[in-house]
Amino acid sequence: MKKRNITFTTILLVLGCFTIGSVPSVSASTPTPVTITGVYDFSTFPDVTGTFTTSGALTISGPSTMHVDLNYNGTTAHCVVTLIAPDGDIIIHQQCQFATSPPSGRWEIVSGTGAYANLNGNGSLTMPPNSEAMTGVIYQ
């Protein structure tokens, strides 16, 4: 009788493992709309400083820096934006093109520190004079 109970218990454990393993997983991230606006003083180009504000999924503000890398003929740029918030920093890479008025492009959060260490996000941007207007989503 004892041998039968051990065998029955083993079978139940194995079946339990298969049942638990077949439960569908829930997505770890939900996209949430965000707007990030940076205002910069371009007199120190290509390394500029300014301030930023956010709305939507994030509501923070603070100082910001941006390094601008223009291509050889000035029609596109790659920028690295650092948002310096009270609880950590957010690093954003931008790909910009100057064929439209105002210029436009794409942005992506590539890393963060502190409270923003696991933050991801991306979207589109426009560049009115002296500013960067980013809209998109973040994944928390």
Image (spheres, grey):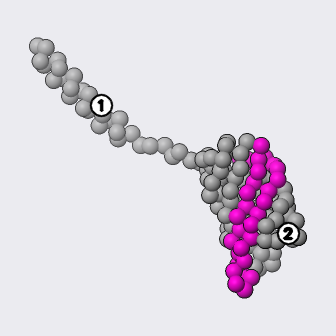
Residue 76, image x, y percentages: 70, 78
**Which label sits on residue 121?**
none
The answer to which quarter of the image holds residue 115 is: top right
Of 76 and 133, nearer the camera is 76
Task: Give the amino acid at mark 2.
Answer: Thr
Residue 90, image x, y percentages: 69, 52
The answer to which quarter of the image holds residue 47 is: bottom right
Which range of residues does the magenta coloring cover?
Answer: 57-86
Q: Residue at x 81, y 75 (%)?
A: 102
**Which label sits on residue 44?**
2
Of 79 and 105, nearer the camera is 79
Q: Secondary structure at mark 2?
A: helix
Tags 2 and 1 touching, CB below 8 Å:
no
Secondary structure, magenta segment, majority class: strand
Q: Secondary structure at mark 1?
A: helix
The correct choice, above or below, for 18 with respect to 68 in the image is above
Of 136 and 113, nearer the camera is 113
The answer to which quarter of the image holds residue 132 is: bottom right
Quadrant, the N terminus: top left
Q: CA distance from mark 2 to mark 1?
A: 64 Å
Whether residue 30 sits left or right of residue 69 in the image: it is left
**Which label sits on residue 16?**
1
Q: Which comes before the other along the chain, label 2 or label 1?
A: 1
Task: Report if residue 60 lies within the magenta region.
Answer: yes
Task: Give the amino acid at mark 1.
Answer: Gly
Whether residue 79 sits left or right of residue 42 in the image: it is left
Whether residue 123 sits left or right of residue 50 in the image: it is left
